[in-house]
Image: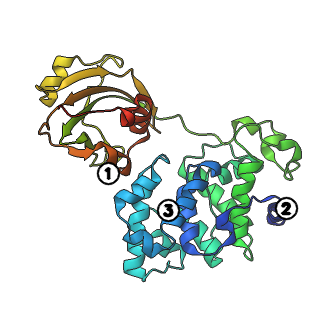
Amino acid sequence: MNFSRQLLSWYNANKRSLPWRTTRDPYRVWLSEIIMQQTRIEQGLPYYEKFVQAWPCVEDLAAADEQEVLKCWQGLGYYSRARNLHETAGQIVKLYDGRFPGTYESLKSLKGVGDYTAAAIASIVFDLPTPVVDGNVIRFLTRVYGITAPVDIQATKNQILGIALQNIDHRHPGDFNQAMMEFGALVCTPANPGCRDCIFSSDCQALARGLVGSIPARSPKLPVRQRFMHYLVLTFTKGNKLYIYLNKRTGNDIWKNLYDFPQMEAPAGTAAGTPLNEAVLRRSFILDHAEFEGSSSPYTHILTHQKIQARFYRFHSGNKIELPYLAVPLNELTSYPIPRLIERYLIESAILSTPRHPPS
């Protein structure tokens, strides 16, 4: 079969109209590739449009405050992508005078740019024959070529890359790469693929051998880490304003540089649904003069390799309590980047609309 010719013909007739496909601006191509990693088009498109509107060029993004970038990214998950995006923009401005480097290896030297993203930019913007291998491409090629080995081991990755290199169209490498990704997204889908109307059905090894449902294969999953968080939601009045305490997350744990509430993590093995009593909370956070207002039901939040369960405990004080956290006016809370778990709680508890009046 003439793989690339069939594929490009299909792509030209069926490709979706997406804003980053009408430009060869490396900034916008790079932005789209970072946003769309592990993200559905429908979810990622509004974020792409928000970023382009807020920061139309790489110099604008480099000059932005990281907190603004994280806030714009809020809800998309995998926040290291946003931090890397901001850092890379600064790197491009500082080291390359605002111009993206034009080789695969130099692109890979940028923060947060791996094999896939470097190949995408190199092929789409600079016409280099560097094949992309993402989840859609892996599924598509392993089915057509009947590869049954786990795709998360290096030998299989090398085999898939070799097939892509063998087939890439050197005259239109960018279109070829986008066509492979588009075919995996629209036809060779994870569930209920369109095998009946597939242009490769007569050559597909997985279809011929009845293996479509079991390819691509993966190694056994890593165990999911179970975590339970107890969050202190402490407000206080000062003058005519209501304040709330926030905790900026640092280190190498989840949600780095985002804001949640002061918290205590239960030790491993603690019964997941067991709430802390008021006395423990008062001792732990030194809340002698705060009024306890109750606790939430458990919240569950799923990350890639972690399952987080959390409870929220509300306290209020008529005066400021000195704690090593950031006191923020409640009406400014929405300007801080927060994890989806915290956002859910704030919405469901209606805490932002809860009226408070300082003592007369």
* Residue 63 relative to residue 149: left or right: left
Q: Residues within 10 Å of mark 1 (few under 14, many from 20)?
A: many
* Residue 208 relative to residue 146: left or right: right
Callout 3: helix, strand or loop? loop
* Residue 296 relative to residue 186: left or right: left
Q: Residues within 10 Å of mark 2 (few under 14, many from 20)?
A: few
Query: Where 58 falls versus 212 (above or below)?
Result: below
The residue drawn where x is 22% and y is 29% is 316
x and y, in percent, of residue 190 in the image: 69, 41
Sequence-earlier tag: 2 or 3 = 2
Residue 282 shows in the view: yes
Of circles 2 and 1, the one toward us is: 1
Residue 114, numbered circle: 3
**Quarter occupied by the C terminus:** top left
The residue pinned by badge 1 equals: 257
CA distance separating discs 3 and 1: 22 Å
Of circles 3 and 1, the one toward us is: 1
Callout 2 amino acid: Ala
x and y, in percent, of residue 121 in the image: 58, 70
Q: Quadrant of residue 215?
A: top right
Residue 13, numbered circle: 2
Query: Where 286 falls versus 102 (above or below)?
Result: above
Q: Residues within 10 Å of mark 3 (few under 14, many from 20)?
A: some
Sequence-earlier tag: 2 or 1 = 2
